[in-house]
Amino acid sequence: MRPACSVLLLLLLLSACGATTSSTHDDASISTRVKIVLLNDPQVAQYRIDARTFQGVVTLTGTVKTQDEVDRAIATARKTRGVKDVKSEMKIDAGRWTADLVLSATTDDRLSMCGC
């Protein structure tokens, strides 16, 4: 009777390990799919938005200009296969993007003045 119990216990332990590995693999796949979908969305592709997944729940982080872009990133992530829910830790910083545009315009002006 004892060997049968040992075999049963071993099978239970191995099946639990397989489930944990499968879940981890699926989370990595989900994160990758969400990142690809976000990069292919013209409204949010310009921002560095990261997606981390734990048990099918995706957490988005990054900085964008507007709430509409946050909403778009969340909606896009929710449509991705395997996603159970989406949490946002994204930040809105319109001033950061304005400063980048001013710096870019200033650099372009200087380049045109020097004939580069």
Image: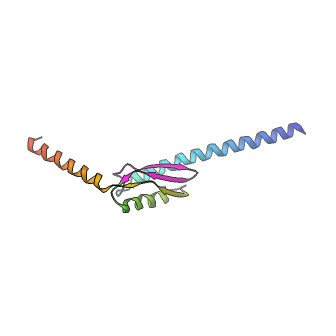
Point 64% across, 44% down: residue? 20
Residue 115, given in percent of the width and then of the height, sits at 9, 41
Q: In this view, does 39 lie above or below 9?
A: below
The structure's colour scheme is: rainbow
Point 34% across, 56% down: residue? 42
Residue 38 horizontal side relative to residue 83, left or right: left
Of residue 94 and residue 113, the one placed in the foreground of this image is 94
Magenta extent? 45-63
Residue 77 horizontal side relative to residue 56, left or right: left
Residue 7, given in percent of the width and then of the height, sits at 81, 39
Residue 18, given in percent of the width and then of the height, sits at 67, 43
Residue 62, given in percent of the width and then of the height, sits at 40, 50
- Tally the marks: 0
Rendered-image quadrant of the N terminus: top right
Point 45% across, 61% down: residue? 75
Rendered-image quadrant of the C terminus: top left
Is residue 103 visible from the viewing direction of this image?
yes
Point 75% across, 44% down: residue? 12
Whether 52 is among the magenta residues is yes
Residue 4 horizontal side relative to residue 61, left or right: right
Whether 10 is among the magenta residues is no
- Classify residue 2 by image quadrant: top right
Is residue 79 visible from the viewing direction of this image?
no
**Among all residues in the image, which is located at the extreme top?**
3
